Image: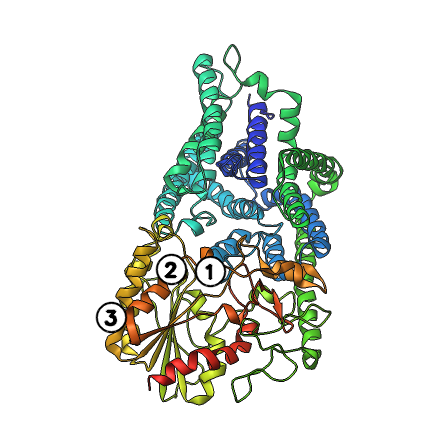
Amino acid sequence: MVRKYRGEIQALRTIAVLAVVIYHINPNWLPGGFIGVDVFFVISGYLITTGLLRRVAEHGRISAADFWANRARRILPAATLTIITVTIASLFILPRSQFPTLSLQAVASGFYIQNYALARQSVDYLAADTAPTPFQHFWSLSIEEQFYIFWPMLVVAAWHIAQRIRWASPTDDIRHRRRVRVAATVLFFAVVGGSFAYSVYITAHNPTSAYFYTLSRVWELGVGGILAVYLGDPVKFPRTRKWLALTGTLTILACAFAYSGDIPFPGLTALVPVAATAAVITAGHTTGWGSPQRIFELWPVQRIGDWSYSMYLWHFPIIVFFEALAGRKATVLEAVIIVLASILIAGFSFYLFEKPILHSPTMRRSSPLTLAGALVAVTAAVGIGTVPHALVKMDEAKAAAAEAQVFDPPELTAAGEFGPGFKSLRTTMYEPVYQAQPIKPGLGSISENHPTFDGCGDVPALGTSANTPPCTAGDSSGTKTLVVAGDSHAVQWVPAFEEALGRQGWKIVVIARENCPLNPQPRTFEQQESGFVCSQAVPDMLTSIQKQKPDAIVITNRRYDDFAGGQSNAQRGYEEVFEQLSDTGAKIIALGDSPEAANEENMADCVAAAGDDTSACDFPRPGQAEEKSNRALRGAADKAGDSVDYADTLDAFCTDTTCPAVIGSRAVYRDSNHITAEYATTLDSYISRDVVPLITTAE
């Protein structure tokens, strides 16, 4: 007789959910707490497969529709409640700049494809600085739901295979069920083996996305499925099972403390927590000295295990809302309150909403009714999820209507001076404005306001891509060619160059690579992020620049501080680049990087939350201590002589002391370090005054 209630599995759920919650509150406290998700995967695979095989044993067949209806009753009520409640709460708590991503992920969570939304964001460098939404944790639920779609079909396939054999050679029910299990085992091993091989491969080549891919995770659920085929409820070898349970439990805890986000995961590394979880499930109920069963069966452990699904759903929104309101991570005391609040809300959700629907006699009797209710639930969740996006569109419409009221930064006069009524100090390029004027771009669009290029692929190119194709911006028939090269901080200047030079017969070609400076010296980031080929791509980028036969070249990058060998190596790398490009005969401009706040605050979120006075988002003008590789770029330019000029850009963003977040009603930054395309279009005055003369002097 197989026990329907497994106390040790409830304990595993408790360990898993607490590990994940602590990790999400502060990864430094439990750096490997993310392995709690892997524990859940194995448990889910085991329980789901156990239920499927039990139906085959009891009824001689399996109905996929009944299975999906049961899953819908278990999963959808609490998830739908969470999505709707959290979306509405987010409208009042989160800054408007997060609404586009919030809406995208709410809808993705409602459709249970959140893992793919996050996988795409993880490789989208333009979104890399986006704050986490309160739906980010739905990625693991999405993988489980996708697993629930195809996994029962394997059991159905195994039943049909056994049934065909039965028709060809009639046998009793016992042999038939045995053949179902054998066929299921073969199919399960095929899926698990293929998924594990893919997981190892993709983790080595693209670890960030591999974390969210369904195919790289299915093997973990499949391991639980294979256990369910033959395990049953073990009673033999009590001493061996006792130590298996203890060892498995301690191994899971050890992984939670020893692992960190720096290790490649899942892949081979995930084998340890997966195997440890399988060991505890295999051990079953244990007794005697050294057995963890007494701890497993404590009332709090069992109740948290019961509520673990609801607790998983609610804990992350609570954490995100707290950090949005407090502007920081939680203290230890606050973390305890967050955990207790998550448990309390989970208990209410379980008893008042989740359990009544799960055990509803009406819903249990009718799978079609349940599936219809599931469709209504998904529609409601997705519909509410689109509200933040709709509000952003309304903001954009209002901003467009108020276009004439927007105060632009002043233009330079023909004499190279600022117009009347404006402070013309050298270090006061544009006057910051702190008053209730419409900010452009709209508050909900700031984080997405980056340059776009028709007819080109990724600009900048992905850091993991094989090459860095050039992209022509603006007029492709220009008689003169300006190449803008570097990383995404080079791309952000393109609108300014288009405004300053686009109407003067210049063709602007962009050759840029995400997170990769135009420098052959490797960075530690490149060495840590598997698949990034920055320094190796530089020769190809230089060749591409030379093929353009440019009249002028602008090189700029973010001010990195992690070059292997320090800034002396960084300068040496820039010197090599300048030397190779000097053969083109083009004038080379080394453009200093735009400033960024020392605390790496997301400026778009700050501006969106600031109201009429955005001065709280301003930050001090960086000194030389914050220049990092900017100094190496300038040093290499000075050493190159007349062929290279260095142009500093701080005066285009800062007064003598301060770098405003909003200038002339234009939001300056779209994240912690990139400037908005809206503000870049106003920098044509700076380009015309400080950069164009350097280019035309060489003509």
Q: Earlier in the sequence, mark 1 or mark 3?
A: 1
Residue shown at the point (41%, 57%) measured from the top left: 628
Residue named by callout 1: 125
Question: Relative to residue 253, is residue 151 depicted above or below?
Answer: below
What residue do we see at 53% from left, 39% from top? Answer: 27
Residue under label 3, please give it: 580
Q: Residues within 10 Å of mark 3 (few under 14, many from 20)?
A: some
Separation of residues labelled 1 and 3 (CA atoms): 28 Å
Q: Is residue 293 left or right of residue 555?
A: right
CB of mark 1 within 8 Å of CB of mark 2?
Answer: yes
Q: Position of residue 13 (x, y in %)?
A: 57, 31
Tag 1–tag 3 contact (CB < 8 Å)? no
Marks 2, 3: nearer the viewer: 3
Q: Is residue 652 left or right of residue 202?
A: right
Residue lying at 74% horizontally and 42% vertically, measured from the top left? 362
Q: Is residue 414 visible?
A: yes
Q: Dot 2 lies on which element?
A: loop
Q: Which label sits in the foreground, 1 or 3?
A: 3
Report, in whole angstroms, how far the alpha carbon at label 2 lies from the one at label 3: 22 Å
Count the numbered circles shown: 3
The reply, left or right, for residue 496 in relation to residue 509 is right
Q: Is residue 458 above or below residue 416?
A: above
**Snapshot quadrant of residue 545:** bottom left
Nearer to me, 543 or 664 = 664
| Badge 1 element | helix
The residue type indicated by label 1 comes to Tyr
Q: Is residue 240 above or below residue 38?
A: above
Residue 49 position in % (x across, y down): 51, 36
Is disc 3 placed on a helix, strand or loop? helix
Asked if disc 2 and disc 3 are in contact, CB closer than 8 Å, the reply is no
